[in-house]
Image: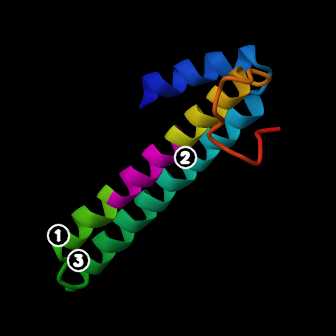
Amino acid sequence: MNLRMEQLERRLVEQHHKDLFLQTKHTLAAIDVLADEHRRFQSIQAISGVRIIGSEEALFYETLTQVKETIVETLEKTLADLEHKGDKHYHNNFKDGVE
């Protein structure tokens, strides 16, 4: 995912839309903070004797990974729409536009 983000950053800078990249980067970082807070909370719970269900933990982290992937895919679609702006043969991903 890091390589994809680097490529997207270069393409967005060329399109003068670095703000989109930064917003996405900050969103992904917020999800990482949420995962870390959850991990710490679960550690505290485990220390205090609460039984942690591993399958639920795996599902939680898998869901976060899917959310992050969806956010990056949305940025890729947005960038594709920006790059094809004005192309009448291109079918936009977002009907409401990207500007």
Which amino acid type is marked by label 2?
Ala
* Of pointers 2 and 3, the one earlier in the residue sequence: 2
Which amino acid type is marked by label 1?
Ser
Furthest-front residue in this view: 89
* SS for dot 3: helix
Q: Is residue 71 above or below residue 18?
A: below
* SS for dot 2: helix
Residue visible at 37% across and 50% down?
65
Q: Is residue 29 above or below residue 46?
A: above
Horizontal side of 59 relative to 87 (left or right) equals left
- Percent x, y of residue 10: 63, 16
- Judging by the rendered image, the residue that carries numbered circle 2 is 29
Residue closest to the eye, 94 or 48: 94
Residue closest to the eye, 88 or 7: 88
- Judging by the rendered image, the residue that carries numbered circle 1 is 55
Residue 46: give its label. 3
Residue visible at 23% across and 77% down?
47
Q: Which residues are magenta?
A: 63-72
Q: Quadrant of residue 16?
A: top right
Q: Quadrant of residue 90?
A: top right
* Of pointers 1 and 3, the one earlier in the residue sequence: 3
- Percent x, y of residue 61: 32, 58
Horizontal side of 49 relative to 91 (left or right) equals left
* Of pointers 2 and 1, the one earlier in the residue sequence: 2
Q: Residues within 10 Å of mark 3 (few under 14, many from 20)?
A: few
Which amino acid type is marked by label 3?
Ala
Distance in Å between CA atoms under marks 1 and 3: 15 Å
Q: Is residue 95 above or below residue 4?
A: below
